[in-house]
Amino acid sequence: MADISSEETGSYGDTVREDIVQTAVKFLENRNVVNTPLAQKQQFLQRKGLTDKEIQIACERAGAYILHDKLAREPPALPIPVHSNVYTSQVQPISFLEKFKEIVHNVALFSAVAYAIYMFYKKFIRPFLFGDKKRKNLEEQMEELNNSVSTSISDLKNSLYDVKIEVDKISQGGEDFHAKAVTRFKV
């Protein structure tokens, strides 16, 4: 094997590095690498500096082409779990209370997010878009309060005057009634 045969020399006079080919064969026969796709293995070997001829020789010696053809014809097998638990989980139906709890949690979360968005809008976006409402200064507020009190006092005076008129009418009517009643008993 140390001799390089005419088959192992490239068509362009390239020589095959036998020690590299042997290392590539060991790589291709590794049990962790055997099941990987052939193209991926060849790309890896190219990145490591092997020529196409060296890769071809290594694949022939390792039987990678035969294994690739065999795997291509067979349907992929189901993977066997290495660590299968004794306790296999079964899908259990969700109870009404658990469904209700999930719904309440989702509604609460949605409400909190909506409220946060609303507060962000109220505090930052609305003043930016529509301008901040100017607050009335103290003098304007005092003026409005004074006008309101004045209006209330004048309304109260008018109501009091109307009540006085009504009381006077009632008291005059009562005196007339009293006078008639007294004259009737005297007769």
Image: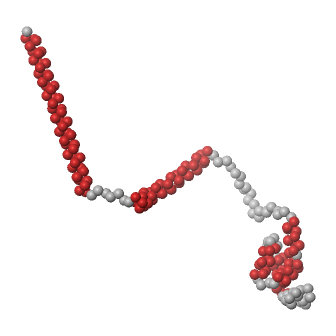
User: Residue 137: percent from the left, percent from the top?
Assistant: 27, 58
**136 above or below 178?**
below
Q: Residue at point 19% right, 41% down?
A: 154
Point 20% across, 46% down: residue: 150
Q: Which quadrant holds residue 162?
A: top left
Return the residue found at the far right.
6
**Picture coordinates of residue 51, whole percent (x, y):** 81, 84
Identified at 25% across, 55% down, the residue is 140
Residue positioned most to the left = 186
Q: Quadrant of the N terminus?
A: bottom right
The residue lying furthest to the front in this view is 130
Quadrant of the snapshot with the C terminus: top left
Closest to the observer: 49 or 95? 49
Q: Position of residue 175 (x, y in %)?
A: 11, 21
Is there any visible trace of residue 131 in the rendered image?
yes
Instruction: Residue at 19%, 42% (x, y): give it.
Output: 153
Residue 71 position by quadrant: bottom right
Q: As drawn, is 124 to the left or to the right of 182?
A: right
| Observer-nearest of 38 and 12 | 12
Where residue 70 sits, quadrant-wise, is bottom right
**Across the whole image, how many numbered discs are drawn on residues?**
0
From where the camera sits, is residue 31 visible? no
**Front-lying residue, 62 or 90:** 62
Percent from the top left, x then y, of residue 112?
A: 49, 54
How did the renderer colour the structure?
secondary structure
Q: Nearer the viewer, residue 77 or 75?
A: 75
